[in-house]
Amino acid sequence: MDLRSVCWCVLLSVLLSSYAEARRLFFRGRQFGGMLGSPRRGTNVTINVPDEYFEQQLDHFNPTEARTFQQRYFTNASFHLPGGPVFLMIGGEAAANPAWVLEGQWINYAQKYHALCFMLEHRFYGLSRPTKNIDTKYLRTLSSEQALSDLANFIEAMTIKYELPPNTKWIAFGGSYPGSLAAWLRAKFPHLVEGAVSASAPLLAKADFKEYYRVVKDDLSLYNSSCVSSLREANHGLRTLLKTPMGQETVNIMFRLCDPIDVLISNDVSALYDTLAMNLAGIAQYNNENRQETNEAINLNVVCKVMVNESIGTPVHRYAAITNMILEQSGVMCLDYKYDSLISDLSEVDWESDYAEGARQWFYQTCTEFGFYQTSSLTIDIFGNEFPLDFFVQQCADVFGKMFNKEQLMRGIRRTNINYGAMNQRASRIVYVHGSLDPWHALGITKTLDLQSPAIYIRGTAHCADMFASLPSDPPQLQYARKIIDSLIGLWLVEK
Ligand SMILES: *[C@@H]1O[C@H](CO)[C@@H](O)[C@H](O)[C@H]1NC(C)=O
Ligand SMILES: *[C@@H]1O[C@H](CO)[C@@H](O)[C@H](O)[C@H]1NC(C)=O
Ligand SMILES: *[C@@H]1O[C@H](CO)[C@@H](O)[C@H](O)[C@H]1NC(C)=O
Ligand SMILES: *[C@@H]1O[C@H](CO)[C@@H](O)[C@H](O)[C@H]1NC(C)=O
């Protein structure tokens, strides 16, 4: 038995115990822009907020459908004074986290303006479960349009429950996809919502979101221009290794793959390149946002320090070193990259399964409404064209069924852009906030087109940075952005 196979036995025995966890942590939920986790960064939040439920219509667009479901929400009425406004945090992409009604920048605004605070969980996520399971046939009423009508209904229901005076002003908040919902809610229901703070929101639905990795590339070159060339060489080195059986064994060990790579399975090769790129992208998207769900110490600076450090080995060794750092930090023993395991995870329809909290549901929304697939097609020089659009479209079909093909995806995306207007927003009193490091800014409004709905583009910050409770170490441009948002809210609340 040579040393390598011994290593394999050890690796395999450990990985079995942590396989489920490995999948959870290395699941591609991260690639989809959001999963706004805890509002506090780096520390534990003690949460003592009761779950509340209200009765929601199952289908807002079918007048003959009378069925309802229980939709979850959280309340913080501590700051509210009679006649004060109502702030509404919108959920989406995952279970709603009750910590948001205790913390986050919007809570500071709520204290200042004596707002009643609610967070509404998005239908089909968390404990807001309209159907008996999430089989594809039940997901027909999972859409952003249904979610917007849920929000409108919720506003009406709370107005009655809290006996709010008719002139009460509601302000919507959201980050990532819920940020898009916040903007669309204001646009679709201006009689219900006075204004919206829309953070890191993609507004243009697009199948091939190739610009995502262009921003990641720009982020890396900001730290060290050699960082990008090292990454290019690393992927080149990986390709060379994968050409020979010996090289493949090296890759198995170097990148700590849970299952050895079989280069005859082309989806596995794509999935490996995609998973490695995604880990890097996650660092860029959440750079220096030390939240529990993301990597605390590993930021772009650390990544580039490793990528240019010749004493760690060749570029592919350095790339592997980063993967290992991420695995270690996450307490995961091995890298789960297999295409089949991804598909089988996403195919779980039981509410109690690990992926039913939101991964399968969000994937469904991307396959039917948004696309947003982060492909390699604009960064072929770096990653090769290893994860093109067809790789993701294939996943839609493999998870939800053959009819979820490219034509259907394109139809859904076109429909979304016509319905919401893509980048051509006309509603007043929306503030669009983006960070320059966040790849999602490429699909959002970063320049003010309309003084009634300004854009704030923050240099050097990542995804949804303005939503987190401020820290003394926040850069001045971020502190300034929060001040502008504060004063816009103040203005909206006094305007007639
Ligand atoms: C957070 O909570 C976990 C488990 O409850 C605990 O082990 C850890 O030490 C806590 N971390 C901090 C920073 O309080
Ligand atoms: C509302 O949030 C504040 C600030 O976190 C907290 O002190 C208060 O207990 C919360 N109120 C409720 C009812 O949860
Ligand atoms: C960038 O990387 C090169 C090695 O490729 C290194 O010599 C240089 O010091 C790095 N620059 C910074 C600012 O870290
Ligand atoms: C480069 O890596 C070596 C080996 O891990 C480490 O000792 C050294 O401090 C690193 N250099 C820099 C500049 O980070």
Image: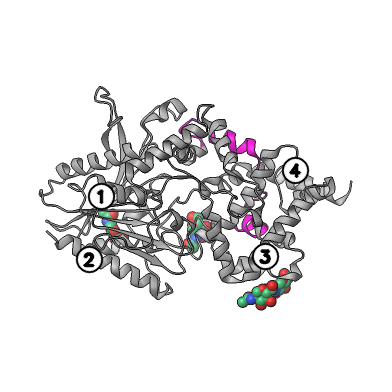
Amino acid beneath label 1: Arg
Query: Which of disc 2 and disc 4 is earlier in sequence?
Result: 2
User: Is residue 347 a member of the stretch shown in magenta?
Assistant: yes
Query: Which of disc 2 and disc 3 is earlier in sequence?
Result: 2
On the image, the x and y values in percent for residue 459 come to 44, 69
278 to the left or right of 361? right
Q: Residue at x 65, y 48 (%)?
A: 385
CB at disc 4 and ligand 4 closer than 8 Å: no
CB at disc 3 and ligand 3 closer than 8 Å: yes
Amino acid beneath label 2: Lys
Check contact, mark 1 vs mark 2: CB within 8 A.
Answer: no
Look at the image and tell me in which quarter the C terminus lies. bottom left
Q: CA distance from mark 4 to mark 1?
A: 50 Å
Query: Which of disc 4 and disc 3 is earlier in sequence?
Result: 3
Camera-near label (1 vs 2) is: 1
370 to the left or right of 210? left
Q: CA distance from mark 3 to mark 1?
A: 44 Å
* Residue assigned mark 4: 260
Q: CA distance from mark 3 to mark 2?
A: 48 Å
* Residue assigned mark 2: 112
Camera-near label (3 vs 4) is: 3
